[in-house]
Amino acid sequence: MEIFSGIVQGFTTSLSITNLAYCFVGVFVGTLIGVLPGIGPVGTISLLLPATFRVDPVSAIIMMAGIYYGAMYGGSTTSILVNIPGEAASVITCLDGYQMARKGRAGAALGISAFGSFIAGTIGVIALMFLAYPLAKLALNFGPPEYFALMCLGLTILTYLARGSMLKALSMALVGLLLSFIGIDGITGLPRFTMDMVHLMDGVGLVPIAMGLFGISEVLLNLEEVIKRDIFETKIKGLLPNREEWRRSKWPIVRGTIIGFFLGILPGGGAVISSFISYGLEKKLSSTPEKFGTGMIEGVAGPESANNAAVAGAFVPLFTLGIPANVTMAVLLGALMIHGLTPGPMLLREHPEIFWGTVTSMYMGNVMLLALNLPLIGLWVKVLKIPYGILFPLIILFCLIGAYSLNNTAFDIGVMVIFGLVGYLMKKLDYEGAPLLLAFVLGPMMEQALRQSLLLSHGSFAIFFTRPISAVAMGLAVALILSYFLPFLRKKRPNLEEDNV
Amino acid sequence: MKMKPVISVVPVLIALSLILAALGWAADVKYPTKPIHMWVGFAAGGSTDICARSASAIAEKALGQPIVVENKPGGGGALLLGLLASAAPDGYTLATTSDTPYTRAPHLINVKYDSMKDFTPLVRLGLQRQGIVVRADSPFKKWQDLIDFARKNPGQLTYGTPGPGTTPHLAMEKIALQEKIKFQHIPFQGDTPAMSAVLGGHVMASATGALAWTSHVKAGSLRLLLVFDPEGMDEWPEVPTFKKVGYSFEAPTAQMVSAPKGVPKPIVDKLITVFSDAVMSPQFQKVAREQELLAAKPLTGADFQKWLQQQYTMYGTFIKEVGLQKKTE
Amino acid sequence: MKIGEILSSLLLILVGTLFCRSSLHIGIGSINAPGPGLIPFGTGALLILFSVGTIVEVLITKRAEAQGSGPLFMGRRWGVIFSVLISLFAYALVLNFLGFLLATFLVLSLLFKIPGQRTWKGAVGVAALTTACTYALFGYALQCSLPPGILEFLGL
């Protein structure tokens, strides 16, 4: 009953004209920065922090939360249109979303990610309302060994992303890990592999690598074609997903939502991991896994739902334990503190209006986002009709500004250009960028968790198999590897014969 | 008689130089004429960031020019000081960091600056409260229980900290040295992860900044065993301080504002006045209370410089004693 | 394509070796007290292993043709690719000196010109317009701090 009175209280707070307006401003700005690469929710929220000093704390949090999930809605747009992931969580969307755009189905891809996001966001908020407190303890059960096991499972699933040689995909994942080790070691504080460059002390940035590897390299590849030829099929077939596409997306959205919400609760890259676990799962369940990467709508619907559900999940540890699940949440935590509120076990008791007001506002925010994004699809699709000779300098310009504005240094532009060349060569040689980028995101967390586990266990690897959660995750990883290798070894011979023909 | 012209020239010269100096001084007082950049050595939303933003928001009113806060995190603030060392000393580039990159980082890693020579420390905003917590259901009811356990089981007591070389880590290692026992250190990245690890039962104790655990101690899910600062904490007067359990050292962490070396004196004075006033303002004191920051008396100028120098030397010997000093190649 | 795949694998082996060597230098530690180099060393070693595996795979299978986006050395417009890459590098180098407005205007003029469909006049015009629009959006509306460079006196 307490929950229902809370919900009523929440809606009275969030439905006030002022708070609705703040919510709208939040989701609007969020959509905008989600679309623009480089400028992420972290930067925007920290930029707006001082401006919210004088505002009522609930309104401030409602607006900043709106920016966060609004950015998740917008993040898929550039992935689909120009193959530039707005953030790590939409890397996976590039794989099939961009291919759909090239086939003239950009509208369907954008549409399904908007609807998927809406459904996942709404279910996520409902789950947040009812399960936040029961689930709070779940996040705490994840210690270093559990994280390491989860990351292992994640990396194993990466091999499912590969279309060509698995060895090449694994090599790329390892390169991603190695790149992520550059910079200050989180455990000893010593700089590693920095070649004495100040800019590398902080590591290589994710955004310049992602924009180089995906965006710039794609531009280079397209420039190779005669420029007059259209890169995109100009005949846009329908602006929204058709009935067949809906049928195929239905279950991926549901599965993505569940995966996203639960992984979102865990501090760490919940949104990222859930997006590619969802992709891996859809590919595994599909009757035509070989078609993934050529424009399968399941590969857009699942991950896009997952990363939006993860947003709702990420609020669980923030509100209940005061533990931010990611950098954006850390900034939100700071925002709450500036307003004199300490998120944690006392928040619901002392300031119930903050929790319920924010949560219910997210419901309104999702409705606003859907209303805001659907009409935009028509506009985005028109972007693809711009002749490539004009479009490509604009794409590059957005990448340049995005890479620069992240840390305000031209060094990141250089990094982006280098990875543009690397990505171009990789595409020529059939190496895939997604495993590299995802391993790059997971690398630091994985390494830390492994080293902390070994310190905890005094060097024994048994720690990963004696604790239930990590044992299950490790077991799943091993089973996946076996299920991949067994048919691979068995099929090897017929494959060779086939090739001989 | 021949001296006369010379003598008459002297007062003219003095008068002239006085006028010039006054003009020059007047010109300097026209500071600031454009927005000031406040760099923060840590990520947005963290303790240092919140201090920097609140202090800047108050100070910019007194200065009449906006203070633009920019986060430049990395290397525990060491990256920022590297940049600050080569920034223009015109008073338009300031930095807020903890004292870590000033007093500890140079002993631990190779840094690209001389922390005692390359900067003008302006104001110490406050000292961060810190303490050691265990989970509420832990068998350690008081500090001595933890020490007894560690003595009986060498290397079995696991404790989390916000990272290697942080004050909680140094303090714990120094305690181990003094008690002649051995702890197992598990470093995390930041106060909150270290606190979550003790909450989840993955480590037996955690030594972190107070901000991370106060709400959990209030809610009864964590128990506070020991407080770092000599005054103890008002909310839990029964919890012992370092001094009370027989540790004669302190391990403070400060939040501070500084500028590059060579900023003109009038500007330094103005900034010191403005930022000390900001610290003493009720708004900042409220933020400080919420941030578990002891900000009752801001240290400034020469006193602050002296304090930093003391800390630098103290941590130098401290770090050598516990064997964490950087490798010299 | 075999040559390209073997060369790239050799390059990855080199990368792995460099990381391994550097890891040894910063200290591997031991399994119950892992040093900062332990995990990078393991990762580098695995990379070497997998790259050797890739070479073997390429050599023993007859399916040698990479299904990537066409042959590596037969791109028809290498000139275009390289002019784009070089102009972007140059942009990174001069950005802080020339400032956002000037550098962006120059690089955009080049980019609009490079595909070879536009006259210089047209390219420069579009570049000027685009630079102005982006500056209004990012510099003013979104308050990004873009470097002013030598145009600082304009006070933009």
Image: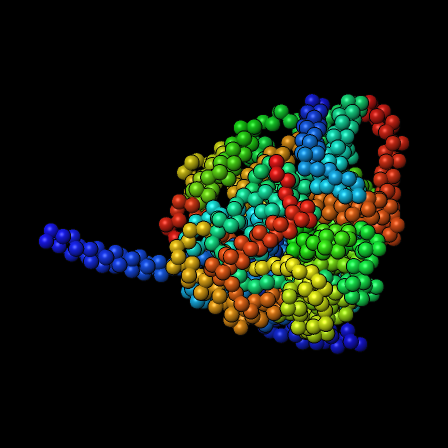
State the residue at coordinates (79%, 26%). Answer: C57
Number of labels in the image equals 0
Q: Is residue A496 visible?
A: yes
Which corner quadrant holds the C terminus of chain A? top right
Q: Is residue B46 left or right of residue B178?
A: left
Residue that appears at 74% across and 49% down: A273
What x and y, as percent, mark residue B21?
A: 29, 57
Against B46, residue A203 (above or below) is above
User: Looking at the picture, does residue A370 appear above or below residue B233?
Assistant: above
The foreground one among A78 and A408 is A408
x and y, in percent, of residue A48 in the image: 55, 61
Q: Position of residue A354 (x, y in %)?
A: 67, 71
Q: Residue at x 78, y 56 (%)?
A: B203
Which quadrant of the rendered structure holds the N terminus of chain A? bottom right
Work out whether C147 lies above or below B245: above
Q: Which of the pair B25/C114 is nearer the observer?
A: B25
Q: Residue furthest front?
A: B1
- The answer to whether one can see residue A27 in this image is no
For the point 58% across and 38% down, the residue is A196
* For residue A199, side relative to residue A313 (left or right): left
The image quarter containing residue B16 is bottom left
Question: Residue A254 appears at what percent x and percent y?
Answer: 79, 56
